[in-house]
Image: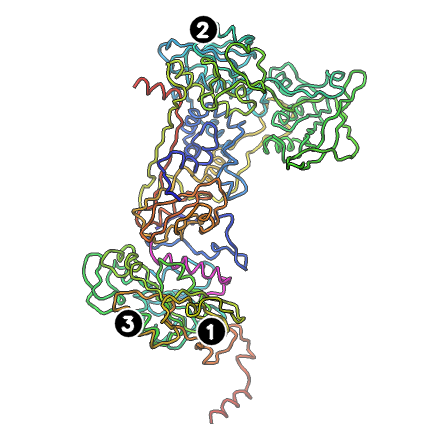
Amino acid sequence: MVPTDVRDPNYFHKVVDCQWACPAHTPVPEYIRLIAAGRYTDAYMINWYSNVFPGILGRTCDRPCEPACRRGRLEPEPVAICRLKRVAADNKDDVRSLLPARPAKKNGKRVALIGCGPASLTVVRDLAPLGYELVIFDQDKGTGGMIRSQIPRFRLPEEVIDEECGYILERGFVELKLGWRIDSMKQLLAENFDAIFVGSGAPRGRDLDIPGRKEAANNIHIGIDWLSNVSFEHIDKIGKRVVVLGGGNTAMDCCRTARRLGGEEVKVVVRSGFGEMKASPWEKEDAMHEGIPIFNFLVPKSFTHENGKLTGIVFEKVKAEKDAKGRRQLVPTGEPDEHFPCDDVLVAVGQENAFPWIERDIGIEFDQRNMPKVDEKTMCSSHPKVFFGGDAAFGPKNIIWAVAHGHDAAISIDKSCHGEDVNDRPPPLVNLSSQKMGIHEWSYDNDISNDTRFKVPLRDQAITLKNLKVEVELGFDRALGYKETRRCLNCDVQTVFTRDLCIECDACVDICPVDCITFTFNGLEADLRTRLTAPAENLTQDLYVSDRLKTGRVMIKDEDVCLHCGLCAERCPTGAWDMQKFLLDMAHATEVSACRRG
Amino acid sequence: MTYIVKPKLHHPKLKQNALGFTHRDYEGKVSTLCAGCGHDSISAALIQAFFELDLEPHRVAKLSGIGCSSKTPDYFLGQSHGFNSVHGRMPSVATGASLANRDLIYLGVSGDGDSASIGLGQLAHCLRRGVNMVYIVENNGVYGLTKGQFSATADKGSKSKKGAGNQDAPIDLVSLAIIMGATFVARSFSGDKQQLVHLIKAAIEHKGAAFIDCISPCVAFNNHPGSTKSFDYVREHNEAVNAIEFIESKAPIKADYEPGTVALVRQHDGTYLKLKKLHTDYDPTDKTAALAYLMAHQAKGEVVTGLLHVEPEAEDLCGRMNVAKAPLNSLNEAELCPGSSALAKINAELR
């Protein structure tokens, strides 16, 4: 293998699995250390710069970081990264003085943003301090988009949404046009904005066109519309027996909300198996914890009704089988159909994008699936002034992806407004610095804890199931949060090897608790992976290979389960190993603009 | 010195031995020796050897004297028995312990100061008597704990860290061991774990006095250009006479290698040592030839390593003395006091 080039920022970035997996690339271990140190405000600000909504995401994030967490490869459960973020948000001081200053004057550029959800708000956060005049349109009466309309209050209190949307909307020349529907892109383009950002989400819930749908329509509700109506207090009750159709996170929100609005017997019925459901494991757990059973492998066949009133749903029983091409398919088991009697049905079988308001002859190209053609890096459409982000860009994803899109779109908008090439993307800011403080002292806590993941304390169900607005999770308190932070392996503190200093004494090999270091003769990667001290079977994790050593061998380190405990560096007599903190901050529009001025 | 406890988390796919242990179950505390010390590599090799032989840690007794080397039993086999004796007196303690309990596996860990100076007499008698043990000397040629004075094994003419030359003739521990009658004599190098692990395994299985002189560079005081016990010097001058493999199988082994390249040495208990010959003319069962070979190559400044001498039909002290097979602490009153008729019989034999 060719010696590893650690000067390539991607190499060490990949080692920080959580940061690499996060669409916004939040420096997770850095803020976890700050929480451990009781520096909640600093931890919050790192998050705020990177993911804009720490308090909101600390409760609702889809947490792609957690399945990626290295600790999860050594133990059954990863670090509770998401809920630690909430600890920072809950315990911070007033951060207003730390937020970017409002610009003294306008920069003369006007940008329209359609939708006031996480994608648009991120664009606003990035552009407002630069003096842009920003006009936000949203059909709803509240800010936050789906954050406010679709996520129930018992998961995310209103104050948190108000606070974090507020931080953004105060940043500069922002005009809010709520309850204002955009019906024609052509008209909007005619208003001579310098750029238009489409962050309108995926606002259309998929319907279920099966017999009885029309007849029983009064008691059949589309999940996201129903949640939105509950959120804006147009609906405050539901029948006693409720069936929720669908296996995604929206279905989980629907069933738990129904449970609080009078649903005594709430059931979730899903076509697929339990394991294939789209909902996050923890959301399924939360629903079941509230006494909501989940039924699998049942395909809705028809709604039953009497005198225009829904009486139930008939389901066909299916099983998963692989077809000739090896694809999974659901085939009927042949057993008799099952009837679920109920008073109301919530249909949460998916969401779609809909752009009836974008005329097809104004230079914005659409693909066969009727989705706009959007560049994944720049978020540019085929129209030079129109940019997309969030669910509107590539279909339903989640908040953290919307944030990442927002950052990218803001850079593109800023560049396009200054006549620069949007494809010329700014590199991240990367810093690598030794953590050595003394002979065997490091500026991070390398004595990691053996604790398993701590559970987030919940409020008593006797209270939470009665009130839609009472938050279920109490969050980690400071003491519990501290204990959880100590499970973090500090994967950003990198093991950096200097070939010329190594005397091949084997001390690092002997001390490594996870057997990840080997000195052997070089070879091809596939061959090397079989010749290491411990098997290196995780192909997604790189091997760190040194140049040839004195004996002709090379040092090979399997990054897979390295604890970053620094013992290799502590036992190294020559300092050939050093622990160096790798800090990577993504560039945002603010920095790009600062470079332009400077 | 490392302050933290070595994390308990381990690689999820660690190999387990026949007892269901991983090599991490054979570890001890975190070493307090200097970073990079050769002794730590030897500890790691011991861990590997005991793990691979599927030995239960509680069947092992670690014995040592004084010095850097003699601290190391704390850093491996944390669940074994141990005795840290007075300077140079480990062999006596080992002799007594082995007579009192033949069930345990005795591992003596000593250094060049402990064995070649203050304990030289003890070493000689222990080997001469054939105490059934593994006697390993972690040989770095200096007194590390007192800041690097030459020890008795330092080569004449080798230089100290400050540049002073050693005037005295060295004690060659392997030659001494062969002369003293050790029935398994080997030399190895802490920087060559592959060779060392195999030698330790064979030494553990050897019934009799097994002696290993292991060159172990002192990174703090004896790893500089003028040293003959540095990583670089030993790597450049290492002359391995054979590559050893211990074979537990007692069934006759079919030779499937080129004649003259491999020697199979059948031991007293029926186990085999497979020796891949690196020098075709070297025969470790020939004591005289081994000594001559050692002297000739040492004169050239070479460090001869490998299994240097083995007596396949070795006997041990307990066997020769016909010591009770069961540990003395397990004998009951009837066995210890066989009664007046037995005493009368013994007295009659002495008349």
Q: Chain of mark 3?
A: B
* Alpha carbon separation for disc pair 2 and 3: 96 Å
Q: How far across and how far down the image is residue A332, in percent?
A: 74, 33
Q: Nearer the viewer, residue A387 or A561?
A: A387
Q: Tell me where residue B39 sits by quadrant.
A: bottom left
Instruction: Mark 2: give few (<14), some (14-19) or many (20+) Cα within 10 Å.
Output: few
> Element at badge 1?
loop
Q: Which residue is mark 2?
A: A192
Q: Is residue A17 magenta?
A: no
In the image, taking residue B75 as reference, residue A398 lies left or right, namely right
| Residue B267 - label | 1
Q: Which disc, if any, is residue B295?
A: 3
Mark seen at residue B117: none
Let me know if residue B117 appears in the view: no
Label 1 and label 2: CA atoms lie apart by: 96 Å
Q: Name, please, the residue furthest toward the right.
A: A307
Q: Position of residue A241 (x, y in %)?
A: 73, 25
Other residues around mark 1 within 10 Å, as few (<14) / some (14–19) / many (≥20): some
Q: Is residue A202 left or right of residue B10?
A: right
Quadrant for residue B200, please give it: bottom left
Question: What segment is highlighted magenta in the picture?
Answer: B35-61
The type of residue carrying mark 1 is: Gln
Q: Secondary structure at mark 2?
A: loop
> Of marks 1 and 3, which one's residue comes earlier in the chain?
1
Q: Are marks 1 and 2 in contact (CB under 8 Å)?
A: no
Dominant SS type (magenta): helix
Local packing at callout 3 (Cα closer than 10 Å; few below 14, some 14-19, many 20+) is some
